[in-house]
Amino acid sequence: MFAHWAGKLTVVALEIPGFGFSRASHPDALSYAGTVAAVVHALRSLGLGRMIVSGPCTLAYVAIGVAAAMPGSTIGVIASQATDVPGERQWIYRAVDPDGWLREPMIGQMAWAQPRVREHLAIDGWYPAAAGKGADIRQWQKTARWAHACGCGNALASQIQEWFGEETSAAVPVVQCPGVILFGQGDRTHRRSDPQGLRRYLPHAEVRLLPLAGHFPDLEDPAAFRRAVSDLLAMAEDQRL
């Protein structure tokens, strides 16, 4: 993506607090509202001007929250591989945490803090289960193992508890900006999820089903992602004319 738009658009990649090498300095940063606030602060500090905000999986909700917080700067939203929050909770219970231990405060954090557990479930198990059949996951796994070996964060248990608990659901806002929802139909973990679910928060978004892509539409079908960007840019240009 960086190479494709070099010299044409500014591309910024952010990791949310508690994941990758973005450390959460306060517990509130792991909540949905705190995560959105941290991302908004980072984006405003960069002075980017008008932008398209994108997020896959649970970061789809962050992208929507950013659009709500920065309406004057947001051209549109590209959200991928998620559904509405109640549906996402059921997906987590069914596909991510079927035994329920990640949902348990302290127990989930202590179990997920064990490197062998994370590597076995998140790297060895997740990519084959979620990627489309034709995806070559080896490079993704190699990158994940490198990050894992370097001590990256992965606050999955805290995110599940803070964002998708029965009493702590993320309060995702409704935004009226243009949007594109990408949904990989090759994702076996999301077979029972509603691809239209995110339209609950993005009522003006177009849903684009990707037959061959799995859980990672921007990686598995980069051409579809690039088309979404181009279409939102063209739509914004038409509105300015």
Image: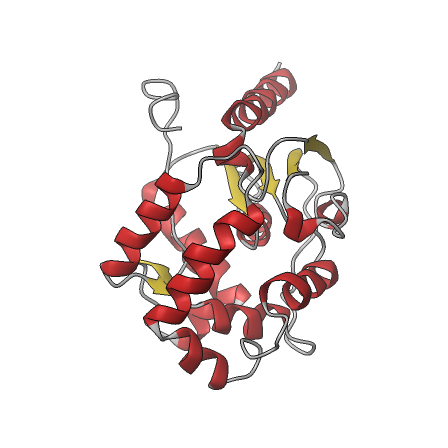
User: From this viewpoint, is residue 18 visible?
Assistant: no
Residue, far top:
241
Q: Residue at x 46, y 63 (%)?
A: 121
Can you give x and y, in whole percent of width and height, for residue 35 in the image? 47, 62
Q: Position of residue 166 (x, y in %)?
A: 69, 76
In the depicted structure, whether residue 229 falls above or below residue 107: above
Q: Residue at x 59, y 34 (%)?
A: 213
At x 45%, y 52%, the residue is: 40
The reply to whether residue 113 is visible in this rendering is: yes
- Closer-to-camera residue (98/30): 98
Report the residue that reaches farthest toward the bottom.
Answer: 106
Q: List the single residue furthest toward the left.
A: 150
Q: Nearer the viewer, residue 51 or 241?
A: 51
How many marks the image carries: the answer is 0
Dividing the picture into quarters, in which one does residue 206 lie?
top right
98 lies left or right of 27? right
Rendered location of residue 78, percent (x, y): 58, 37
- Residue 149: x and y in percent read 24, 59
Along the viewing direction, whichever of 199 and 225 lies nearer the viewer: 225
By what rule are the colours in the image chosen?
secondary structure
- In the picture, which quadrant includes the N terminus? top left
Looking at the image, residue 175 sits to the left or right of residue 119; the answer is right
* Residue 215, above or below 168: above
Residue 74 sits above or below residue 228 on the image: below
Quadrant including the C terminus: top right
Q: Is residue 80 left or right of residue 27?
A: right
